[in-house]
Image (cartoon, rainbow, N blue to C red):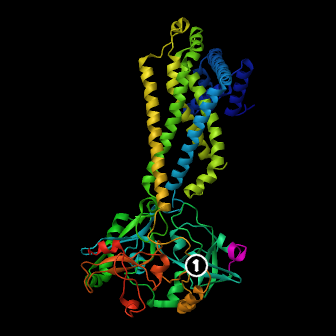
Amino acid sequence: MTPPAFNLEAALAAWRQTLRHRRAILDEDLAELEQHVRDQVVSLTKRGWAEEDAFREALRQMGDLGQTEAAYREVYWGKIKRKRRLLRHIAAELAMLKNYLKTTLRTLGKQPGYTGINILGLAIGMACCLLILLYVQDELSYDRFHENADRIYRLRVERFASGGETELSAAASAPMAEAALKDYPAFASATRLSQRTYLFEQEDRRFYESRFFWADSGFFQVFSFPLLQGNPRTALAAPFSLVLTESTAQKYFGTTDVLGETLEVEDRMMNITGVMADAPSNSHVHFDALGSFTTLEAEFGSTWEWGWWNLSFHTYLRLAPNASVEEAGARLREMPARYIGDQEEVSGYRQFLYLQPLVDIHLHSRYEEELEANSNVAYVYIFSAIALFILLIACINFMNLSTARSAQRAREVGLRKVVGAGRGQLVGQFLGESILLSLLALGAAGLLIWAVLPSFNQLAGKVLTVGGVEQWPYWVGTLGFALGVGLLAGVYPAFVLSAFRPLDVFKGEVRSGKRGAWLRKGLVVFQFAISVVLIVGSLVVYRQLHYMQTTSLGFEKEQVVVLNARNNQPLRDGYQTFKDELSQVPGVLSTAFSSSVPGRDQGHNVISRTAGMTDDGQTMPILTVDHDFTETYGLELLAGRDFSRDYSTDDTSAFLINESALRAVGWQ
């Protein structure tokens, strides 16, 4: 009769069952043993052994089964013993922590005044620090929400005449975007923004919108503002296309489902082709509506403001991933000379182009024609230092209070050392107390932040919020902040208290030493010095703000009402009749028309002392006004005369200049 064929898996299963019956063995040990047998069988079969003989040889090489059992029994019981020792150690540590916690809570409960002062001091310091850090984090996050923020650049212009001051402009001229794409193909896309104030009308809703921008079709290829409805590639492509933000759509239609609707914009019927989310607060530009640039091209063609000298278009370029910004900047710098070099020779003016990183605009850009008022990176450094100083004051206050109570904790330290506690254990105990107080202070600081955040937002002009549940990195960072504060505030008291010697304690000879006394005095002096600096700085800022709010601006700003007549052609044509009607209104003392008002954007032009001369020319803001402007605004004339209707040339060739312009042109 032919014997059955050898089956390795069945043989291993039988051998495994034998081991399990004869003794208890860990699964992982048995798995390792079985794998070793398998490896031996494979090795022997490769050398020509039959599989059954290879299996028996592998078991023989393992040694006697009893020896194998003994060896693995030793391993097994060794692991059990190590686990038991580890569990006993963990239980002992938990018991010690429980004892420390009881002692800490009992100590804090017996001295509610000390506990309250420490927690309140840390809580106020932590709340102030966290609020300032929220502000700093918001400042540093501007424009970083765009997907390609690190590859988006704004085109800025430096323009000057020989002998004149350099004009630094955040805006470019209309042809520069197309020329940049043509001269340097590594720019993936570009868009221009031109801000206007227009009258919007929808049935009985009529509002002037000052945050309206004309934009190129590449707007959504450069920026990552989410378009909730519409196609980002075509939303601004066709003439008379209009994209609204959510809030603007709600304002005029009461809903955001407005695709295909029309809205009248300064006597134009615009087709709504998209609805986008409102721009976040940490964007350097905010808008309520975007109109397609092709609308202007369709209406005005080449007669509109397309010249190279009209710097009123904010131009943004997105660089391709592997392109060199240095090479692109070098190509663009001399671009105006390549296109309008003859005009520059005649005018005496030169223009140079530079790429400004998008993420640098908010903190590092203070040029003319900025879309919004930017901040300054110096404020980030100053406020960060203030946050650090406030936190140091709170920590030093905690240290001083803790070390001042050293005599009351001396007996506890001495007794713990007598029964065997080491200095490391005592340091851990006191650091644990400090961390517990810091965590309690963090909870109180959270309540303070929740209470004052609306007022802080109003003061800072921000829309700051604390992280939600989904923003777990924020909460992990805050918890780490509290642990760091606890360690910083508790490390010195912990080492001071743990250094007491039991013999000195029971003799009543506890002394902190001259070094400790000098350190505590130094901390107090440092604390008061920081406090004085912060108080003086606060007073200086307060006086500056008070000065800005109360100082005379050189014209009457109270009781002056401004009516926006921009883009209202009928009113502009009949402005004298309108003025006469206003003068009949009781209480109206004077009226005047002007192209803008003091303090707002004004038109610029090149001014020189002698007609036709360019070597002394420079760009100055110009305000176009009528005869009654100085009387209406209460301007004081230091020399000369006011505009007069008795001189017909005043309508075309008369100017009033201020003291700054007087000095700029070099007159006495």
Q: Is residue 255 magenta?
A: yes
As drawn, the residue found furthest toward the bottom would be 648
The quarter of the displayed image where residue 33 is located: top right
Residue ID for mark 1: 234
| Magenta stretch: helix, strand or loop mostly | loop
Q: On the rendered image, what quadrant is the C terminus found in?
A: bottom left
Q: Is residue 295 left or right of residue 316?
A: right
Q: On the rendered image, what quadrant is the N terminus found in?
A: top right
Q: Nearer the viewer, residue 489 or 77?
A: 489
Q: Nearer the viewer, residue 573 or 128?
A: 573
Question: Is residue 21 positioned above or below 308 on the image?
Answer: above
Q: Amino acid at mark 1?
A: Thr
Q: Is residue 213 left or right of residue 28?
A: left
How many marks can you see? Answer: 1
Q: Nearer the viewer, residue 532 or 492?
A: 532
Residue 131 % position (x, y): 57, 47
Q: Is residue 656 magenta?
A: no
Residue 284 % position (x, y): 51, 64
Residue 120 % position (x, y): 61, 35
The magenta stretch is 250-259
The quarter of the displayed image where residue 281 is located: bottom right
Q: Secondary structure at mark 1?
A: loop
Question: Is residue 578 positioned above or below 540 on the image?
Answer: below
Question: Is residue 573 positioned above or below 363 on the image?
Answer: below
Label 1: how many Cα within 10 Å (few below 14, some 14–19, many 20+): some
Evaluate whether residue 105 shows in this view. Answer: yes
The residue at 36%/86% (across/down) is 654
Residue 454 % position (x, y): 63, 53
